[in-house]
Image (spheres, grey):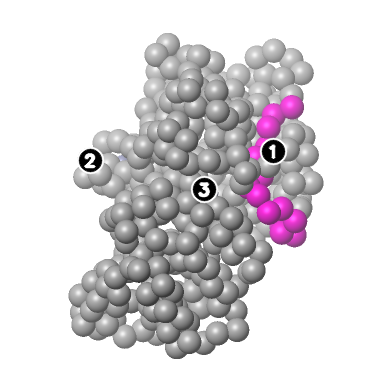
Amino acid sequence: MSENKISSWKMIEPKEEFKLIESAFPELNESEVLVKVAGCGVCHTDLSFWYYGVKTKHELPLTLGHEISGTVIAGDNNWVGKNVIIPAVLPCGECELCKKGRSNICQKQLMPGNDFDGGFATHIKVPSRFLCPVPDEVIKKYPLEQLAVIADAVTTPYQVIKKAELKENDFAIIIGVGGIGTYGSLLSKIIGAKVLALDISDEKLATAKQNGVDSTLNIKELDIKSIKSKVREIAQELGVSPYRWKIFEMSGTKAGQELGFALLGFASTLSIVGFTMDKLEVRLSNLMAFDAKLIGTWGCKPELYPEVVDLVAKDKLKIDQFVETFPLSKINEVFKNTLEHKYKKRSVLVPDYE
Ligand SMILES: [Zn+2]
Ligand SMILES: [Zn+2]
């Protein structure tokens, strides 16, 4: 509770409780700013670091958290006082990939809560170059802490939708409507596509339906052949073309990937958004025969963040119904509950310390 101090909840050891540690405000170089954290979302990646044995690039102890919004309070005067979203991946801006418009896979990229201390803290030191400013009109609609989800959960599907060149009246098939898939569905609707959500959870499909998805199908008890014929029926009902389907695999499962590949038809595009270590056997020549496309996607380049903020500013994208905030001091409880799948919404931790 003291001035010019950062209170951070640090991961000391995997699976152990996070510990509250105080430190002095850090030195800033001219390319860095200090951000007072408004909120930091809890992502599956944080759970991977904390519980599932994935190693952080920076050694422990480390503050996790990479889905951050806040206000710049020190550093470059051009930024001080501004409300910002901190992109989950901060590229170098100078390398070949950055210069060719692929900054999201910059090999010198820095990720808060992985390469350096992240957002489960009162403050965070970050490079200022790729911060995304949040206009006042957006702050009038949503508290800054809720906008943290734009840093990861919303922007990842946004990038892949752009990359897959989804257009108005296209048929978008979303496999897996969890966190990323729900925003993927909403963004596809904003573009004007007809959207079909496929999942094995009636509850998730019901949420997708409530939020404007055109059609849903529970695929739990179905084999691939019957799913294919049902999807064809749904396409007819929705009046979309049998060609050029845009399929988005967002479940990160082998079954989801197999289904996505099986749904490929003439001139269609399958985008792999979810991750699994599992391998599958497919006839890649289908891509040739269908003149189809198979693409991958990683995160979202910071250059696209302002477009997403603009969708929120224009009331096209609503975010509050998918976000639940908790005091940061409850971090240990929230992580345990997240592990046990107790929450239906994205949890955002809000610092309750000075
Ligand atoms: Zn994440
Ligand atoms: Zn770079």
SS label for mark 2: helix
Q: Nearer the viewer, residue 82 or 122?
A: 82
- Judge the density around disc 3: few (<14), some (14-19), many (≥20) Cα neighbours within 10 Å: many
Q: Is residue 236 visible?
A: yes
Is the residue at mark 3 in contact range of ligand 1, meaning its CB lies under 8 Å from it?
Answer: yes
For ligand 2, give the image quadrant.
top left
Q: Which residue is mark 1?
A: 325
Mark 3 highlights which residue? 153
Pointer 2 residue Cβ closer than 8 Å to ligand 2 = yes
Q: Amino acid at mark 1?
A: Thr
Left or right of residue 292, residue 253 in this image = right
Proximity of marks 2 and 3: CB atoms separated by less than 8 Å = no
- Place of residue 112 in the rendered image (x, y in percent of width and height, measured from the top left): 52, 39
The picture places residue 168, in percent across and down from the top left corner, at 31, 54
Q: Which percent across, then down, holds residue 161?
A: 36, 54
Residue 137, above or below 308: above
Q: Quadrant of the N terminus?
A: top right
Neighbours of disc 2 within 10 Å: few (<14), some (14-19), many (20+): few
State which quadrant residue 238 falls in. Answer: bottom left
Q: Say which of marks 2 and 3 sits in front.
A: 3
Q: Decide which of tag 2 and tag 3 comes sooner along the chain.
A: 2
- Kind of residue at disc 3: Ala
Q: Nearer the viewer, residue 334 or 28?
A: 334
Q: Nearer the viewer, mark 2 or mark 1?
A: 1
Q: Is residue 131 above or below residue 334?
A: above
Name which residue type carries label 2. Lys
